[in-house]
Image (cartoon, helix red, strand yellow):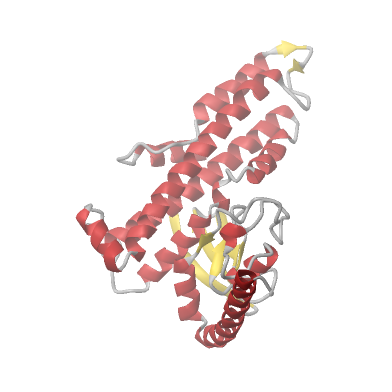
Amino acid sequence: MKFCKTYQRYMQGHDHKLPAVGFKKLKKTMKRCRRASTPTCPNHCPDHCPVCDGTFFPSLLNEMSDIVGCFNQRAQKLLEVHLASGFRKYFLMLKGKMHRNHTALIEEGKDLVIYALINAIAIRKILKKYDKIHYSKQGQLFKSKVQTMHKEILQSPWLSELIALHINLRETKAKSREASALFHGCYLTFKDGKPSLTCELFDSFKIDINLTCSICLDTVFDPVSLACGHIFCYTCACLAASVTIVDGLKAAKFKAKCALCRQQGVFEDAVHLEELNILLGRRCKEYWEQRLRMERIERVKQVKEHWQTQCREFVGI
């Protein structure tokens, strides 16, 4: 079965109306472009095509924004319910959001991961088709532009959290429903002692999320994901943003850059990856205990320095 049909069947099989890639509409746009025989677009397009630039890319960008927005919102709500404790848990129970049982959480998390991956494949395929028809690299350039706008769904910090949630819940005694024909599973894998989150869809699509901090070159500890999608240790991210642990990443200036991709303005919307922290703490116990002792010393030191600075400023020294 062609991917387009598989994709449409998958999206139609959901009870809720979820944002999707409009394959048929986008293909019609490309056909209209091919039929247009003008000096600016004879049979195939040059670097810029008035038909596609005005319709294809803006339409796809809107769809990608809707997909990412929907995914982030649903993932955040699911994780909020799962991680709630104390008064927050009681408040959610009163609002009627705590009705999900353990198995339902596994299934909902898995469905959201599939939704993210299948849409990533759909976007990749439609852009590849665009470049093939137009003999250009505009599709690749558009993808790079979208990544700088943080509209690429594989960049979402909630994707790695959902994968970690799925692994954490799956390792309990709860049984999930029959496995999806699309979904081949999520795993925490180690290669040469370096961990990564691996997720497979179909037989051909596989993503690996590297869990080695590119600053300290160790397994990420107390991990945070920046808006660009790169994951770092919390203390390393604070170091890169030139802020203290006490002030936090929200205090980072806009000009502060990601240590890996050098994008600006990626620290304010950083997400603490609590499920990933739980997963790594369970799988890397010896390393975790050692790192925890080191982090406590460093954090106590920074807190003392912070309050000493505050006191000196208060008395005018």
The answer to whether residue 1 is visible is no
Instruction: State the residue in front, 247 or 197.
Output: 247
Q: Is residue 56 above or below residue 299?
A: above
Count of numbered badges drawn on the protein: 0
Q: Image quarter for residue 144? A: top right
Of residues 57 and 232, the one nearer the viewer is 232
- Above/below status of 62 relative to 51: below
Q: Position of residue 117 (x, y in %)?
A: 50, 50
Percent position of residue 48, x then y: 75, 25
Instruction: Identify the residue shown where x is 57% and y is 77%.
Output: 303
Whether residue 25 can be seen here: yes
Seen from the viewer's position, the closer of residues 40 and 263 is 263
Q: Residue furthest top?
A: 38
Q: Position of residue 310 (x, y in %)?
A: 60, 71
| Rendered residue at 75%/30% (across/down) | 135
- Looking at the picture, does residue 173 appear above or below residue 182? below
Q: Quadrant of the C terminus?
A: bottom right
Q: Is residue 67 left or right of residue 315?
A: left
Name the residue rendered at 66%, 14% in the picture.
Answer: 35
Q: Name which residue lies at 52% across and 87% down.
A: 289
Residue 203 at x, y = what percent? 52, 55
